[in-house]
Image (tube, grey):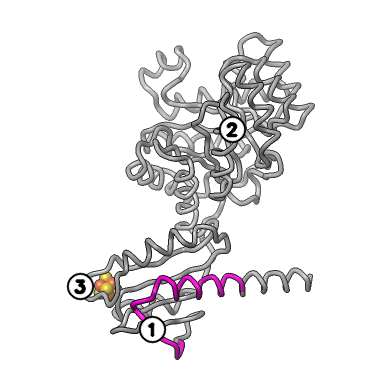
């Protein structure tokens, strides 16, 4: 059963990345980025579709060359999720992908160079309703800022971000979001905190270069968890040296943990011990895989014995409390007469969960019809 999150969110303005609102009262969106060669259109389209299937709202694609910009045109035609083009320095690429329907430009105006070129990109973004993401990274601060601060500090990252913000302000362009990423959790968190006090635009969160799947997920959960629990953050990307699909899953897991945004099954499972009456770990792993396609939020508790089983089941949509041979089964917190055979739990639970999801979806449909 989903509970309200106690988090009070920072008030930000809202921009639109394609059909996805970012900031204001919009749900915190989850992004990922392709790691295929953009010029390999088929591979990039396939990866975008996999990322989308995992639930992402927005996908970023690197566009390092004009050849990649031409590939981007084809990729855009073959996909239907908002795409952000990641561009460094070359303003002509920005103009080109704008022509091809890009939904957001990730480009730092201060890196474009000549004033007329900056103006060309910003005017083009304005004319085509394309927002810009300013992306500051601790690993690539401007030389003079590096010299001034000696090392990346929160003040250094924010100063860098504000340089780009000031350029957009001067050109009267406010449709942007900003990120100040670092691989160090404390540096990133403090930078975002300071930036949140400086601007009203949406913030794109990320712990950059967080590491491999396990360590990177933990690092991201700690950093983004701190910020999100303070109400900071409007969209996020988890940066893992792993399949981008994993980034999306971890992003949603973080949002689910903070009760900010629910998607799919939220499994509540005990770690199991010698009291377990069935194979808890095997059951949960199998169900996680089988039920990946479900997007309806549902809390399902799978607990190995009656020590904690009934208590967790009381506050879950569906609950299982392990018992000898046949386990206790709960719906909406109520114990059912029917008990589930421990030898067949994965199949039985999958069927029960799918039935509950269908029921929930029907209730939502009826409600909408009432309206
Ligand atoms: S709920 Fe039961 S099986 Fe699970 S860890 Fe606790 S005592 Fe062990």
Using a 10 Å C-alpha cutoff, classify the residue at mark 1 as few (fewer than 14 neighbours), some (14 to 19) or many (20 or more): many
Numbered label attached to residue 274 = 3
Residue nearest the observer in this picture, 43 or 133: 43
Using a 10 Å C-alpha cutoff, classify the residue at mark 3 as few (fewer than 14 neighbours), some (14 to 19) or many (20 or more): few
Secondary element at image label 2: helix
Ligand 1 has an atom within 8 Å of the beta carbon of the residue at disc 2: no
Q: Can you say whether 239 is above or below 64 in the image?
A: below
Q: Is residue 347 magenta?
A: yes
Q: Nearer the viewer, mark 3 or mark 2?
A: 2
**Residue denoted by label 2:** 42
Say whether disc 3 or disc 2 marks the residue closer to the N-terminus: 2
Say whether disc 1 or disc 3 marks the residue closer to the N-terminus: 3
Residue range of the region highlighted in magenta in the rendering: 336-358
**Residue denoted by label 1:** 328
Q: Quadrant of residue 170?
A: top right
Counting from the top left corner in percent of width and height, residue 183 is at: 38, 33
Q: Main secondary structure of the magenta part?
A: helix
């Amino acid at each position: 059963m989903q509970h309200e999150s106690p988090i009070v969110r920072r008030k930000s303005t809202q921009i639109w990345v394609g059909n996805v609102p970012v900031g204001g009262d919009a749900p915190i969106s989850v992004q990922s980025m392709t790691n295929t060669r953009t010029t390999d259109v088929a591979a990039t389209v396939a990866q975008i579709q996999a990322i989308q299937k995992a639930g992402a709202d927005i996908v970023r694609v690197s566009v390092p060359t004009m050849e990649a910009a031409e590939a981007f045109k084809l990729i855009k035609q073959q996909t239907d999720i908002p795409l952000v083009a990641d561009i460094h320095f070359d303003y002509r690429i920005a103009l080109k992908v704008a022509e091809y329907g890009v939904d957001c430009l990730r480009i730092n105006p201060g890196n474009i160079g000549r004033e007329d070129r900056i103006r060309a990109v910003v005017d083009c973004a304005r004319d085509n309703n394309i927002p810009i993401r300013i992306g500051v990274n601790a690993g690539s601060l401007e030389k003079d800022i590096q010299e001034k601060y000696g090392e990346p500090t929160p003040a250094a990252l924010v100063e860098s971000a504000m340089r780009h913000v000031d350029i957009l302000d001067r050109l009267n362009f406010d449709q942007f979001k900003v990120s100040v990423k670092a691989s160090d959790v404390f540096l990133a968190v403090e930078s975002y905190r300071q930036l949140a006090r400086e601007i009203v635009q949406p913030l794109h969160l990320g712990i950059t270069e967080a590491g491999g799947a396990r360590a990177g997920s933990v690092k991201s959960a700690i950093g983004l968890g701190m910020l999100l629990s303070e109400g900071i953050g409007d969209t996020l990307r988890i940066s893992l040296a792993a399949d981008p699909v994993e980034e999306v899953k971890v992003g949603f897991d973080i949002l689910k943990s903070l009760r900010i945004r629910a998607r799919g099954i939220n499994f509540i499972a005990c770690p199991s011990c010698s009291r377990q009456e069935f194979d808890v770990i095997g059951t949960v792993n199998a169900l996680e895989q089988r039920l990946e396609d479900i997007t309806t939020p549902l809390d399902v508790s799978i607990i190995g014995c009656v020590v904690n089983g009934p208590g967790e089941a009381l506050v879950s949509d569906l609950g299982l409390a392990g018992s000898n041979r046949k386990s206790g089964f709960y719906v909406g917190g109520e114990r059912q007469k029917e008990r589930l055979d421990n030898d067949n739990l994965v199949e039985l639970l999958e069927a029960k969960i799918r039935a509950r999801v269908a029921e929930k979806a029907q209730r939502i449909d009826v409600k909408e019809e009432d309206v």
